[in-house]
Amino acid sequence: MKKSILSATVILTFVIYVVATLTKSTVIAPVGDKTPPVQSTPSQSAAYKDGTYTGDSIDVYYGNVQVQVDVQNGKFSDVTVLDHPKDRDTSVSIYEYAAPKLKSEAIAAQSAQIDAVSGATATSGGFIKSLASALAKAKN
Amino acid sequence: MKETRIIMGMPITVEIVDSSAKEKDLDDVFSYFQNVESKFSKYKETSEVSKINNGEISESEYSEDMKIVLELSEETKNLTNGYFNIVTPDGKIDPSGLVKGWAIYEASNLLKEKGFNDFYIEAGGDIQTHGTNNEGEKWRVGIRNPFELEEIVKVVYLDEEGIATSGTYLRGQHVYDPFREKPITEIVSLTVVGPNVYEADRFATAAFAMRENGIQFIEKLDGFEGYSIDQNGIATMTSGFEKYTNK
């Protein structure tokens, strides 16, 4: 599989505006089955120190995932993915689809303006783990 | 107005375009999700799901929401030939695969009841849209590149629709194939667009578990379109998918 199809256009779609009121932020519990639950304890006042905190780099199937959290005035201002799966196993065979009538295409990065993103990332074990470790560091 | 909070272990974003929207309206939506979490979280000892799994409450004591979710889970299991199943290998129930989409859908109904027309709600990558965005156009939703997380590989244009993506491209997968122990590696991401996010979500989960046959399952479902991406970066789409890629 050619890497060139995943072309270089970098769109920073994964800047999530976490304007969470900290008293309302609740359990960081993974949806996946394999990650232990991590709790961010709710508290009355600012539970997090201002600053930028980097979560652990979590080894995932295709590489690593690492999440960075920015805290301003005791609230989340940003959650960003720093590291992400990069390499794929190029030795696997191209899969033959059972019903070839469906249209196929090689995926390629788009640069269009968007309002929201659909993807499975935010519920993945690696994302949640790294986020939880970043939040632990940010705690007062 | 737009806000994101972390509830149910994931970022949840609500945007309401209607100028009459107040902070309290966003609060009400987030409160709803917290209420859902307190009932359905398998990580909270006090949740209804935990109480059921610990044998602490009997069926006659189930809340209305629990009864609805269990009923919808059973219905979904039947519609997907058993590929969607909330019973875990150790015999407990874990309805989280249904609850997310259902909760987003119910929360969007809450905003409709409040009289809002232009909004979207996104939780963990699943989205319900309604009306138009702040430019008066269809909502533009990108499908994330499963290999390069800052990138999008497709844009769909939605008015009142739901979109959900299922995937296990990261270790810690939350979808498993109930019929085979072998991990799902044939496809890495499967997106479903449909009349509402609850249905899109349950069919995306089931179709993903069907591996490379999942897109054919979506093809056969009336009113639903799908876009799956395999481990080599090749996408396959249902025959009506491209109607969503036009503005």
Image: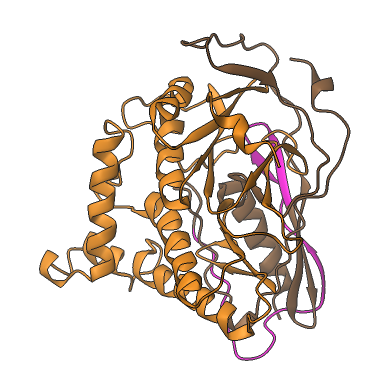
Residue at 80 percent across and 22 percent down: it is A5
Q: Is residue B188 left or right of residue B142?
A: left
Residue A66 in the image, given as x and y percentages of width and height? 73, 50
Q: Residue A46 versus residue B221: which sits nearer the camera?
A: B221
Indicate the quadrant where residue B55 lies.
bottom left
Q: Residue B151 versus residue A138: which sits nearer the camera?
A: B151
Residue at 73 percent across and 66 percent down: it is A17
Residue at 46 percent across and 36 percent down: it is B224
Query: Chain in brown?
Result: A
Residue B222 in the image, given as x and y percentages of width and height? 39, 33
* Bounds of the magenta segment: A37-66
Is residue B90 shown to the viewer in this render?
Answer: no
Residue B141 in the image, given as x and y percentages of width and height? 67, 47
Indicate the quadrant where residue B223 lies.
top left
Q: How many marks?
A: 0
- Residue at the extreme bottom of the image, as rendered: A44
Query: Chain in orange?
Result: B
Rendered-image quadrant of the C terminus of chain A = bottom right
Chief secondary structure of the magenta span? loop
Residue at 43 percent across and 32 percent down: it is B207
